[in-house]
Amino acid sequence: VQLQASGGGSVQAGDSLRLSCAASGLTVSSYHMGWFRQAPGKEREFVAVIAQNGITTYYSDSVKGRFAISRDNTKNTAYLQMNSLKPEDTAVYYCAADRATILRREQKWYDYWGQGTLVTVSS
């Protein structure tokens, strides 16, 4: 099983980025797909999750209204559209897959993790 996160980069405040999480060895339609991030010197934190049904989503308060999580089961890929980026969004972003029947934000429950992609937002 492999989750390949990509799409990170260095941008200015107010810019947008779209992160992708391509899965191999698992079928994303069978998993809740989540995004987490870890800023320098901080613990990894929850960002967003999309349910297996592709409809139900949860966001952290810090990104709600600016980020949008989605999935394309035909491409076996999840996405994180990030708009109105702020310097405090600077972090390594990780995607993860959870096969639970309930939607969860706690990273300890996620079964598989990608390697992370770095997002740097300058002011």
Image (cartoon, rainbow, N blue to C red):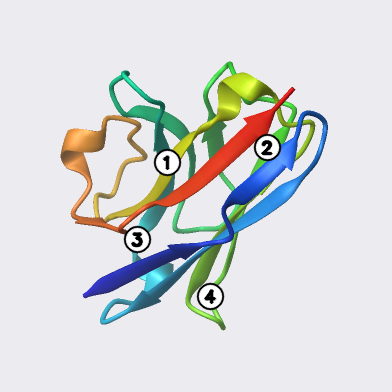
In depth, the one of 98 and 85 nearer the eye is 85
Q: How far apart are marks 1 and 4 (CA)?
A: 24 Å
Q: In this view, does 6 lie above or below 92?
A: below
Specify the amino acid type for callout 2.
Phe
Which circle's residue, 2 or 1, is located before the other in the chain? 2
Specify the amino acid type for callout 1.
Val
Q: What residue is disc 4 on?
A: 73
Q: In this view, does 100 lie to the left or right of 120?
A: left
Q: Residue at x 30, y 57 (%)?
A: 115
From the image, state whether disc 1 or disc 4 is nearer to you: 1
Q: In this view, does 89 lie above or below 8?
A: above
Which circle's residue, 3 or 1, is located before the other in the chain? 3
Q: How far apart are marks 3 and 4 (CA)?
A: 10 Å
Which circle's residue, 3 or 4, is located before the other in the chain? 3
Which circle's residue, 1 or 4, is located before the other in the chain? 4
From the image, state whether disc 2 or disc 4 is nearer to you: 2
Determine whether the residue tagged by mark 2 lies in a helix, strand or loop. Answer: strand
Specify the amino acid type for callout 3.
Tyr
Q: Quadrant of the C terminus?
A: top right
Tally of numbered discs: 4
Q: Residue 92 carries which label?
A: 1
From the image, state whether disc 2 or disc 3 is nearer to you: 2
Q: What residue is disc 2 on?
A: 67
Q: In this view, does 51 lie to the left or right of 96?
A: right
Q: In this view, does 102 lie to the left or right of 58?
A: left
Which circle's residue, 2 or 4, is located before the other in the chain? 2
Q: What residue is disc 3 on?
A: 31
Residue 93, position as x, y percentages in the image: 44, 44
